[in-house]
Amino acid sequence: MKVLVVGGGGREHAICWKLSLSTRVRQIFCAPGNGGTAKCDKTENIDIAAMDFDKLIAFAKDNAIDLVVIGPDNPLAEGIVDSMEAQGLRVFGPNKSQAKLEWSKAYAKEVLNQLNIATARFATANSQQTAEAIVKANQWARVVKADGLALGKGVFVCASEDDALQALNTIYKSGKFSDKKVVIEEMLSGEEISLLTLCDGKTLTPLLPSQDHKRRFDDDLGPNTGGMGAYAPVQLYEKHKEAIQSRVLEPLQKALAEGKLNFKGVLYIGLLMHHEKSSADKSSKNQPEPYVLEFNARFGDPETQTILPLLQSDLFDALYSCTDQTLDKQQLLWSKQSSCCVIGAAQGYPDSSSKGETITFPANESNDANEIIFQAGTKLLSTESGEQTVTDGGRIFAAVGLADNMAEARQRAYKLIATVNCQSLDYRRDIAKREATCQSK
């Protein structure tokens, strides 16, 4: 089988890496790919942008591609799956209407309400004036979200009314956001869980839960980013698995079975275990309840880099089954190890990126199955002295450590990232620290 993976980030490197381990996959093309996919087994980079639908379709048809896997959100939101399927290609990913669960936060909230799945109360606005009025009239209105796609940077969690008004000013006047619609939400308190699920239109299969670290700096300080690291598995999920199953997954599965929800691909469920400040039922001991913060319509980043090394099943078989509605015949097996993923980023990220700076990875990075580097914002250049890898983005790579417990997994990830030579490199030092501490108690 021949596979085309669309995208060029760390998520796509992880997908190519995992697909290359499949005995059913003979050749992988990654468009446009990065410095890591350029050296990945069975993989060849193709110089076609992820948004160049016509060239991607022509390449897939000319090369008899058996399966196209879409990585990023923008092509999905613009209808790449619709275009490819209209040309007879087999594609893993949602069409444009299905991907609306991600490209419109307001639509996602409406779906959650229709399915009676708990989510933060919210209001929508189409102008700054209306949005400001909502913030001023409601003390709960402290989370401001741009309705459309914003590369993980369109969410503002605000401590005060003034902060929320400033967030609205950023969305409407900074020029960074094209969408004029905003969703204003109540701020919920609790821990977040990233739950990625595979879906073939009728069956929903959860992948291994993980927890993302979205804030830029240690102790969850600084601006939101696309993700500075993640870990799996998550003890919090195991503790509340029954509630998540009955209150989130079962309603989604029922909606699929009844035709009330139509989706194919990866449905990423952003969960928060919310603690109510008070509880009328004292016998409940104020247990946290699962709330859905958001949906994404594709593999998460860096969650993908975190969980795929723990997947023992064939990724190609799982993805292919989602295209012909045979997912119910797939049984996914997972390693019992722990995984810690630390993102190496440019020092100025998320405000700026690094481009053209030489970066050197350890020569034996692929020899240890428990220490893996997935490149993201990199390019492989050919020079007179040989091949050279340079930076080409904000999040440059992911260092993943695997071990029998989270403390050792963290140790391996941080030992690995310390071997990377790049002058402008920065990263958080506390990824999975709390989970490792909890495990050791």
Image (spheres, rainbow, N blue to C red):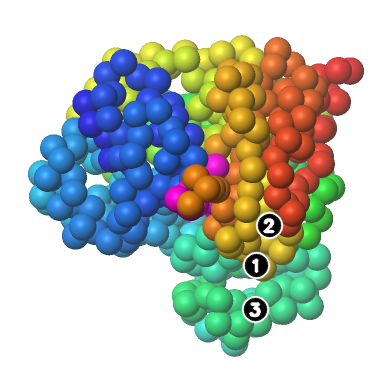
Q: Which mark is residue 170?
A: 3
Quadrant housing the N terminus = top left
Residue at disc 1, secondary structure: loop
* CB within 8 Å, label 1 to label 2: yes
Q: Main secondary structure of the magenta part?
A: strand
Q: Where in the figure is residue 421, as x and y percent of width and height? A: 71, 44
The answer for how far apart the CA atoms under marks 1 and 3 are is 17 Å
Residue at disc 2, secondary structure: strand
Q: Is 48 situated left or right of 435 in this image?
A: left
Q: Which mark is residue 159?
A: none
Q: Where in the figure is residue 97, as x and y percent of width and height? A: 29, 55
Residue type at mark 2 is Ala
Q: Nearer the viewer, mark 1 or mark 3?
A: 1
Q: Nearer the viewer, mark 3 or mark 2?
A: 2
The image shows residue 436, relative to residue 431, as above or below, that is: above
Q: How many marks?
A: 3
* Residue positioned most to the right: 441
* Residue positioned most to the front: 384
Residue type at mark 3 is Thr
Residue type at mark 1 is Ser
Q: Nearer the viewer, residue 294 or 313?
A: 313
Instruction: Bin the neighbour count of mark 2 within 10 Å (Cα to Cα): few under 14, some 14-19, many 20 and up.
Output: many
Residue at disc 3, secondary structure: helix
Query: Residue 376 in magenta?
Result: yes
The magenta segment is 375-383
In the figure, residue 404 lies in which quadrant?
top right
Q: Where in the figure is residue 320, as x and y percent of width and height? A: 27, 28
Q: Which residue is mark 2?
A: 346
